[in-house]
Amino acid sequence: MNTVRSVIAQSGLPLLEARMIVGHVLNVSRAWMIAHDSDSIAAGSLVSIQEMFRRRLSGEPMAYILGQREFMGLVFKTNPSVLIPRPDTELLVETAIDLLQNRPGATMLDMGTGSGAIAVSVAHYCPQAAVMASDTSAEALAVARENAQNLGARVVFVESDWYEQLPVGKFDLIVSNPPYIHHADSHLEQGDLRFEPPQALTDFSDGLAAIRKIIAGAGDFLQGGGWLWLEHGWDQAESVRSLLMEAGFANVESRRDLSGIERISGGQWVISE
Ligand code: GLN
C-alpha cells in the first residue's frame, strides 16, 4: 500500500524535500503527515507526487516545482521566468525597511524586481511608502504583479531596461539585486542556477556591468539625500564601493549578511542641483 510514510521513504529525496512535496500535493501540514503516516495516498495525488519527485531528482529547484518560495515571512509565487528569492537578499530588504519606516510618503524604486520579492516585501512592511518596481522582462513582471496582488502590497510596476523606459521621478531610495555573476563563474552550471533565467544571474560580462549601469544613472533618479543600495557577489564589495565613490556618492558602506559576507553596498546622493 502507498502510505504517507512509504511514499516519502521511497522517494530517493532528502526527507525534508519529500515531505514538502507530499505536503504540498495533499495540502496538509508536516504535523498532519507525521500523525497520519500510515494513511494511504489516493492514486491521483500519488501520480502528482511521483511526477514532482521525478522533477526534483533531475535537479529542478524546489521553488519551481512547488511554484512558491518563502521570503521575509511571505510566500512568493515563483516560476522559471524569475530568480528564486534567496535568504541573502533579506539583508537588502531589511536595510530598505530601516530607511523607509516612519517616513510616510517616502519613495523607493526596485530595479530588476524579478518575482517582486524586494519591492513587495518593502511595500508590505512599510505600507506608507510609495514603491515602484521595474523589470525588462514582461514575464517576470506578470509574476511580480501577481505576488503584489496576493500579498496585498501596493507597488507600481514598469517594464524598463534599467533606466531607459522609467518615468521621470526622484526617489528617496533605489535598491537592486541585479545580475552580478561573472559570465565564466562555474556556479552558473550548478544546482538551482542551471534552471534560473541567465539574464537574472549574470551580465554576460565581468559581473559588474549591470551594477555600473545602475550606479551611473542613479543620480538622475535620486532626491538629494537619497540612498542607493545594491546587492552584489561575495568578492565585489570593494569594487562596488569604489564605483559608488567615483560616481559622487557619500557615506559609502557595505553590510554583511548572516554568513559574515559583505553582501550589500550603498551610498547617499548628497549632490544638490
Ligand atoms: N545570489 C545569487 C547567487 O549567487 C545571484 C543573484 C544575482 O545574480 N543577483 O546564486
Image (cartoon, rainbow, N blue to C red):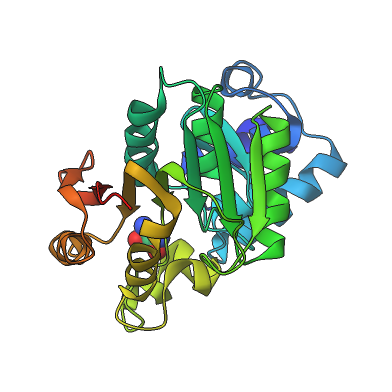
Q: Compare residues 191 and 18 and report the one nearer the observer.
A: 191
Q: Compare residues 105 and 233 and report the one nearer the observer.
A: 105
**In the image, is 125 to the left or to the right of 88?**
right
Q: Is residue 35 above or below residue 73?
A: above
Which residue is pictured at 66% across the width and 55% down the height? 158
Q: Position of residue 119 (x, y in %)?
A: 53, 41
Q: Position of residue 167 (x, y in %)?
A: 61, 56
Q: Is residue 244 above or below residue 250?
A: below
**Residue 178 visible here:** yes
Q: Position of residue 141 (x, y in %)?
A: 68, 55
Which residue is pictured at 64% across the width and 18% down the height? 32
Q: Position of residue 271 (x, y in %)?
A: 25, 51
Q: Compare residues 162 and 27 and report the one nearer the observer.
A: 162
**In the image, is 50 to the left or to the right of 109?**
right
Q: Is residue 87 above or below residue 27?
A: below
Which residue is pictured at 57% across the width and 49% down the height? 133
**Residue 11 visible here:** no
Q: Compare residues 147 and 209 and report the one nearer the observer.
A: 209
**In the image, is 50 to the left or to the right of 267?**
right
